Amino acid sequence: MRTLPITIVSAFAIASSTAPQATPSADDRVKLETVEVRAAAAPRADRDAPPDVEDGKLNAGRKATRIALDEQPAIAGDNYRQLLARTPGLLLSEQPVPSHYNVNYRGLGDPHESEFVLFAVDGVPVLSDWFGYPTLYFTPASQQVVEIDFLRGASGLLYGPQPGPVVNLIRRGPEPGSATSGRLDLLGFGNGGGALYAESSFGGDGWGGFASAAQHRGDVDRVNSDFRVSSGRLSALWQQDGNASWWVDASAYRSGSNEPGRLTLAQFLANPMLSTTPDNRIDIDRLDLRVQHQRAIGEASQLTAKLFHWTQDRWSRRATNRSPGAAAPAFTTYDRQKFDVTGLDTRVLTEWGADHSLAWGGTLYASNSPRTQSRGASLRGPGREGETPRFAQDRENAYGAVFLENAFRFGDWTLVPGLRQERVVMRIEEPLKLASLRRAAIERSFARSETLLGIGATRLLDRNWRAYANVSQGYRPMRYDDIGNPIAELATTNDPDPARALNREIGLRGRFGTAGAIGLDVSLFRIDLEDRIEQRLVGASDVERINSGDARHQGLEFAIEGNLLAGDEDALLLYLNGSLLDARITHSASPALVGNRPQYAPERILRAGLLWRGEGGHRLALTGTYVSEQFWQDSNLGSGSGTSILPATIPATTVWDLAAEWPLAGKGAVLLAGVKNLGDRVYSTRIRSDGIEVATPRQAYAGIRLMF
């Protein structure tokens, strides 16, 4: 499998060598005439959705939302509550330091490290390892993100097999012919932290460039809670001619986060600012490289090819929790996972017949991910490894997929059937086995082929309203620990089937009021999740992963936004969105779980806010998030006893954030200010088996943006 990245690069070279034709490309930068005409005539009903055809993809036939972030002030310190303020149904399970991003949707699985939601940046996944370890440790600086595409339903046919949605973060980037300009944001936080963001754009005839750098440091007023996040990016776009373009992008990211630890219920009630892990830390280093090529083929087709590569190094140093005054742990565990990933996504979009669109293509993906773990007697050892190795694994996977979708348009109707056929091969070898295990060292390969089907339909009721429906299949790819758990005695039986999902959704979106000032999108959904994968305790301490049962997730999702100053130069946007969820476990290997609510499946998630944008660029945002009570275990029970008890539920909570931008007339400067957690709520939206995660207390910030 180590030769597969070379094959992927060669395939990209072949795909991009197609001779240019005389017709413009169909991308958002260079559009086919048929797409351009359709976009110009877009009805009001589609104002808040991405175009039906864009960047080689078909967005039609599924619930899709495009959120423009320029309605809001700049998001300071990558506050995900503010970034996701207008994404209905996404649950943010908060941590106080930026080492993990924890999101789930409609109760599909533990939000830990966002394994059930695919985050992409400019259409490319940014997980640690798309297959095997689909965790999220990185997203770009929020000041670069200009739009969010939120795709539900058959998003798997566009980006991969996952049962959950795709959150695609669209960044600002190079533009051909752009004048040289720059921006510098300087922020100070009330806890002594600070943030810096700088960018510059430049260009000439047929080309454009973009460069940025960001750094954020601070803490959350707990012992061992300080962090530092740094990132940089260089990007260039070359418009080869009227038929083809090349885009090259490189970004680097580094975060170092100390972890103050989780608390028992007694500790949380007595002192939520307590630290129980004064020596723990996690570091993430990542480098992303991308080359994208687009060109016209013939008179009605366009090729989009994306070659991407990333490397990521995840290192952690962790010791067990301890109460103040208790004896220090006897050792620290060092865990290191490296990821070396290469992929190619190639798709062809063809306009054919009277008004139809065909999208087809393929994806190749390969990764190499060694993992080592060791222990040391020193809680803060001088190096990055302990003196006693525990285990080592060599992990690889290779993935290939072909996909086909077609948008058939008949008057006001659009039908979009889709097919995705994929093959994944995973291999695990164990050069060093955990000494306490009786089993043999792992040396196994696992291969699976899957076929996914989906169909979407929309009908334009009139210029202002569109109805849509979607039925689609998805599944959760196997993780390395599902098939080769390094600390389990029963690793050879850890070969469960993938968890599969059937998504169904029907909805209505549109606009009403004066000049369509109010937008509404409401839908009913049901997801049947089969063969859920869970851990089962075997004996005194061994763990086996099994297909434990099924669950159904159904409910209503809505979003309404209205400009209360429609027709004026200023805008005052009032929004309310939410998800009303009824989720239940319907079958389980543990009969006591049947009828329970799945973990992290709150009945209600509501978001509301006011966004004011003044004529001179002034912006003010008051945004709030409400999450109802939720269970953190499928058992719907607490754990522990005595002073170590953990409650069964995570209580309901409401959190408000305030942000503002205020341009200084004629100064080329903008004042920035805000308050996170305006009410200084002491709360948690996250409990793990080792304790309650305390969310960040109130933080105020202020600063300035200089533009030149």
Image: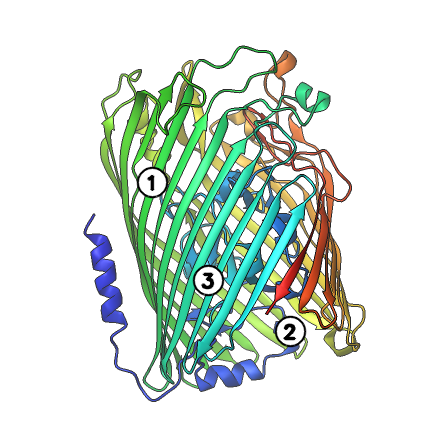
What's the residue type where badge 2 is placed?
Ala
The alpha-carbon separation of the residues under discs 2 and 1 comes to 46 Å
Name the spot of residue 335 as percent of width and height, x first. 38, 30
Location of the C terminus (image quadrant): bottom right
The alpha-carbon separation of the residues under discs 1 and 3 comes to 23 Å
| The quadrant where residue 278 appears | top right
Position of 166 with respect to 579 (left or right) is: left
Judge the density around disc 3: few (<14), some (14-19), many (≥20) Cα neighbours within 10 Å. some
* Res 63 seen here: no
Name the spot of residue 666 as percent of width and height, x first. 72, 73
| Location of mark 2 (residue) | 45
Name the spot of residue 168 as percent of width and height, x first. 50, 59
Q: Are marks 3 and 2 in contact (CB under 8 Å)?
A: no
What's the residue type where badge 1 is placed?
Lys
| Location of mark 1 (residue) | 338
- Tell me the SS state at disc 3: loop
Of the image marks 1 and 3, the number of the one nearer the N terminus: 3
